[in-house]
Amino acid sequence: MSQAQDISVVTVLHPICCGLNVHKKFVTACLIIRDATTERSVLETFGTFADDLTRLREWLLEHGCPVVALYITAEA
């Protein structure tokens, strides 16, 4: 008996983009970089203080990332 696999496919519309998962104490960033033949992702975690967010901004600029999508986790 074979088991079905749940495979999720995400289509990248921009060659360089980043998803940010925003929590109260940290932000997790997943940068996707795609060219004609390869795709790679870089995962990084940042704090939520001003200097941490400045470091996040600089990190995005260093990678040439023009597009960011946010997911904000709310506490109950």
Image (spheres, rainbow, N blue to C red):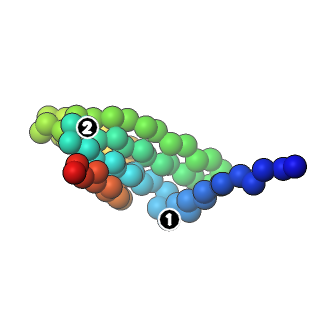
Outermost residue, bottom direction? 13
Corner quadrant of residue 52: top left
**CA gap, disc 1 to disc 2?**
26 Å
Closer to us: 15 or 29: 29
Image spot of residue 58 (x, y percent): 25, 40
The answer to whether 54 appears left or right of 65 in the picture is left
Image spot of residue 5 (x, y percent): 71, 52
Q: Dot 2, how many residues are within 10 Å of its Cα: few (below 14), some (14-19), or many (20+)?
A: some
Residue at position x 62%, y 47% in the image? 38
**Type of residue at label 2?**
Phe
Above or below 58: residue 72: below
Residue at position x 42%, y 44% in the image? 30
The dot on residue 26 is 2
Corner quadrant of residue 51: top left
Q: Which residue is mark 1?
A: 13
The answer to whether 21 appears left or right of 55 in the picture is right
Image spot of residue 43 (x, y percent): 43, 37
Above or below 74: residue 12: below
Corner quadrant of residue 57: top left
Residue at position x 33%, y 48% in the image? 21
**Type of residue at label 1?**
Leu
Which type of secondary structure does the marked residue at label 1 adopt?
A: loop
| Labels 1 and 2: the sequence-earlier one | 1
Which type of secondary structure does the marked residue at label 2 adopt?
A: strand
Image spot of residue 24 (x, y percent): 20, 42
